[in-house]
Image (spheres, coloured by chain):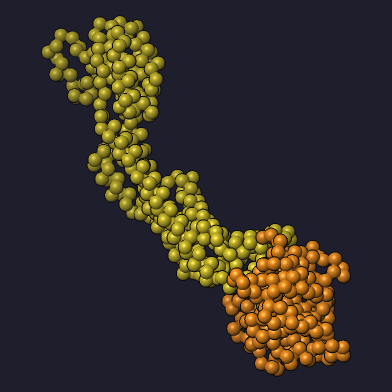
Amino acid sequence: MTSAPGESPVRMYHVSKSYMAGQFALQDVSLEIRRGEFVFLTGSSGAGKTTLLELIFAAERPSEGQIVVLGRNVARLGAGGVPALRRRVGVVFQDFKLLDERTVEENVRLALDVVGTPRREARTRVFQLLKSVGLQHRRFHHPRSLSGGEQQRVALARALVNEPEILLADEPTGNLDPELTLGIMDLIASASTRGTTVIVATHDHSLIERYGKRVLRLEGGRIAEDIPATAGVERGVGA
Amino acid sequence: MNRGLILIGIAFANAARGIRQASTTSLLAVLTIAVVLVLIGSAWLLVGNMASLLAEFGGELKLTAYLEGGLSEARQRELAERAGEEPGVLEVELVTREEALVRFERIAGSAELLEGLAENPLPPSLELTLAPAARTKSSIEALEATLATLPGIDELAHGQDWIEGYGRAIALVRGLALGLGCVLGLAALLIVANTIRLAVYARRDELDILALVGASRTFVRVPFLLEGTIQGLLGGLLALALLFGTYELLLPQLQYGLELVLGRAELGFFTKAQACLLVGAGALLGLLGSITAMVGWRSTS
């Protein structure tokens, strides 16, 4: 099911998340993220960035409030609803989450296997995507033999291979050298230019300044600031 | 290609990969199932062969009704017909005085012992072959009580009282085999479940990543169920091979020993259907072990 055209793919209404009674990881968060929008989530450690992302891809359920992702109410998703939602949401993590015993191609293909994509079609799509991240020559290598930047590009390819409507990235450059960071961020930003809604959690202010996108700053589980995108700072995007 | 077939193919490929990756735990599961099935199979073979020996000897169990000397041939046939109508009687053979003499001569070598007598002293008799269900002490006693009331029947006799004890021994062994089978089966189930749970634990990262990219519960679980079933199948085949090898190795000695004690011994291995059942039991054990292991598993993503 696709959300209606024009409908914002992520909407939160007074969402709170508590893991222990009286302690909130997120508290009374309301927001709306539009289709194709690129949003940075920022804030200090423990501010609630990861929790907010986990709520969007239904790894967690809200304690209070409503979250509507791609037209589905996350709080009411059944056992079959979660996988269906996740096939439309790509996720990238700081620690890559790649399987060492599988090749690069197999790692990326995982996302296609779960939807029963025919093997030949899957190989073609994986090859094209690996080419777009500059790793087609490494497709038969195992992740362990790749650099951190290459591993993150593989993880990004896996997140994008199903052409998701939303791409979530939790500190995607946290483990990378500064020179690799921009390469990864440009790839993520290019997904946004193709219409994918992108949400990146980071505490790297240089990135936020460089890309000039909308910024949601979290503090103590609440949205402390919602800074709109800055006009004329698109220089880094898709570079 | 049909999407369902593609998913089945992927499930089999993932199961094969799982077995390859966790070869030690897979081997452990196969061996566990094989050991349990060897024990159950041995008990099954023992009981099966004892039961067929009992059936063989039971076929020789006959009840003999000796008739009064002065009965006419017509009356003797009438009594034979009447006895044949009794429940549990499979067949009735009328042995006339002359036939009894011939049998005596055959057993004794000649009829010299009877030469001094004026006439054939052997009485006519009815030999009753009993149905398998009627070869118990209580059935025989009931039949004897009925036949004793018939006019013309002088005396009743049956041999092989040991059959009753043998039957009790069979029932005991069968009960023990069943109990042992249940206990061993349950133990194997738990061991296999724990072995597969270890495999699940070792691959939790993979399962979490699969859940992350939108794999359904079925997509994640089916390869593990297939793994368990394949391991069970291999365990069953290994058990069958071990049992057959042991049977072939011990058969000459066993047969010799039994022939010494019982006079003859026709031992048998599993029929094709029974062999399939044993291997199928292994597969079922593996499948149930996997199901037990998967119950309660929940992705952390």
Q: Is residue B277 left or right of residue A23?
A: left
| Residue B254 image offset from top left, x and y in percent | 29, 47
Question: For the view shown, which residue lies furthest in the bottom direction?
Answer: A179
Residue at 79% x, 88% y: name it. A211
The part of the image, by quadrant, that contains residue B138 is: top left
For the point 67% across and 67% down, which residue is it? A63
Residue A177, relative to residue B175: is it above or below? below
Quadrant where the C terminus of chain A is found in the figure: bottom right
Q: Which chain is yellow?
A: B
Residue plotted at (48% across, 60% down):
B193
Vertical arrangement, residue B209 with respect to residue B120, above or below: below
Q: Is residue B141 above or below residue B82?
A: below
Q: Closer to the camera, B124 or B191?
A: B191
Question: Can you tell which chain is drawn orange?
Answer: A
Q: Residue B103: image x %, image y %?
A: 25, 21
Q: Is residue B184 above or below residue A155?
A: above
